[in-house]
Image (cartoon, rainbow, N blue to C red):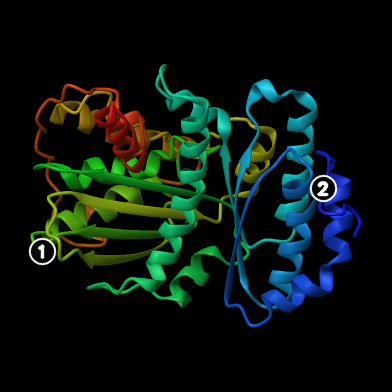
């Protein structure tokens, strides 16, 4: 009634009042839900103003409430960004977990000849993929199952969270997929350092090896907080694709890290893990990175990285095999699901 179906005019207070007007209907729609996902583009009126009301009703009804939202493009102006940041602060008060995708991060991955429509479609796919990745942890049966209780353990009342998906093929696919997943190039924070709760889900064909699971989970574990609660699952894909996929959801960051999220500042809680600039990384450089990570952990008061005996599996990981060179050296900066879409667009042309 407030807007007569004509929208909120990019005014968050109108979106808020409209949601308040229908609060009872929102409560009825969410009644009985175990988990609620909210996706919204912040900065305008409806998503910015209404999403905190929806989140409040979902969470007060007992649902695990997860919001995956985008921030405006930089060219949309300071006012829209200011609206988005205020809406983000309001939303965070009423959700268990909040994942933020700045549109500028998506735009940075767009190719020069990509249309405006394709760019927005890519941003939408990032949101959809986030919801899909989390929901499939629960709904897709696995060899080592992750259930709703596992997801709740990691995501309930955790605040800001990061989600990453990595995929790779070849001899060194486990470490490459895990490294891609923990970098999170599309999100506001580009690594999982400091995370106290982490879900790792590994998906591959019938040829997936125990050592690959070991390498992937341990790679993620070393990038998180030293005392992080790691929950992992494994799904066998009957299609037997050569690709191994690693999905990581990290939450429970320290207060300082959460505050830097809001301020848009880089964090220093632990070592920064970066993906390989080229697929052909030498074993020596991998060892050097590990040393740097250990030293950084000491500097931040986290203590040294856990010795091999305390890893998830007792066997020595050894040095990863050197992967074959690739022509598309920049591909590792682009999440796997977006690489596929870009490739499909190229093929259509």
Residue 126 in view: yes
Provide residue 182's location: percent of width, then percent of height. Answer: 38, 44
- Tell which residue pokes out farthest to the bottom in this image: 32
Q: Residue at x 75, y 65 (%)?
A: 56
Provide residue 79's location: percent of width, then percent of height. Answer: 80, 28
Q: Residue at x 22, y 73 (%)?
A: 143
- Tell which residue pokes out farthest to the top in this image: 112
Where 178 sits versus 233, above or below? above
Residue 285 or residue 274, whichever sits in front = 274
Residue, disc 2:
6
Where 149 sits versus 288, above or below? below
Could you say whether the residue bearing mark 1 is in a helix, strand or loop?
loop
Q: Mark 2 or mark 1, which is nearer to you?
A: 2
Could you say whether the residue bearing mark 2 is in a helix, strand or loop?
loop
Looking at the rendering, which quadrant does residue 141 occupy? bottom left
In the visual, does 167 lie left or right of 21? left
Residue 228 in view: no
Q: Earlier in the sequence, mark 2 or mark 1?
A: 2
CA gap between label 2 and label 1 equals 53 Å
Residue, disc 1:
206
Residue 157 or residue 127, whichever sits in front = 127
Where 153 sits versus 273, above or below? below
Q: Residue at x 67, y 61 (%)?
A: 95
């Amino acid at each position: 009634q407030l807007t007569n179906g004509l929208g909120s005019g990019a005014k968050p207070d109108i979106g808020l009042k409209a949601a308040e007007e229908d609060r009872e209907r929102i409560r009825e729609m969410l009644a009985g839900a175990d988990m609620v996902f909210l996706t919204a583009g912040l900065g305008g009126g409806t998503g910015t103003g209404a999403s905190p009301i929806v989140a409040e009703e979902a969470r007060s009804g007992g649902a695990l409430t997860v919001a995956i939202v985008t921030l405006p493009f930089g060219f949309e102006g300071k006012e829209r960004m200011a609206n988005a940041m205020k809406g983000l602060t309001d939303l965070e008060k009423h959700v268990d977990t909040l994942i933020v995708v700045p549109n500028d991060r998506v735009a940075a991955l767009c190719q020069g000849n990509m249309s405006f429509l394709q760019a927005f479609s890519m941003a939408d796919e990032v949101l959809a993929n986030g919801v899909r990745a989390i929901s499939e942890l629960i709904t897709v049966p696995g060899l080592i199952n992750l259930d709703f209780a596992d997801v709740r353990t990691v995501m309930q009342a955790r605040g800001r969270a990061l989600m990453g998906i990595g995929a790779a093929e070849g001899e060194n696919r486990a470490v490459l997929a895990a490294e891609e997943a923990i970098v999170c190039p599309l999100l506001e924070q580009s690594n999982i350092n400091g995370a106290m709760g982490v879900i790792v889900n590994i998906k591959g064909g019938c040829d997936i090896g125990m050592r690959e699971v070991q390498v992937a989970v341990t790679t993620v574990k070393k990038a998180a907080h030293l005392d992080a609660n790691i929950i992992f699952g494994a799904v066998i894909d009957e299609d037997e694709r050569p690709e191994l996929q690693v999905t990581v959801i990290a939450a429970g960051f320290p207060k300082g890290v959460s505050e830097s999220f809001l301020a848009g500042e880089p964090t220093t809680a632990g070592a920064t893990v970066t993906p390989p600039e080229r697929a052909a990384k030498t074993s020596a450089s991998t060892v050097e990175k590990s040393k740097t990570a250990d030293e950084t952990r000491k500097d931040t008061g986290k203590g040294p990285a856990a010795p091999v005996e305390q890893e998830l599996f007792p066997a020595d990981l050894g040095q990863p095999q050197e992967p074959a060179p690739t022509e598309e050296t920049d591909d590792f900066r682009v999440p796997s699901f977006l690489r596929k879409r870009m490739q499909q667009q190229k093929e259509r042309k």
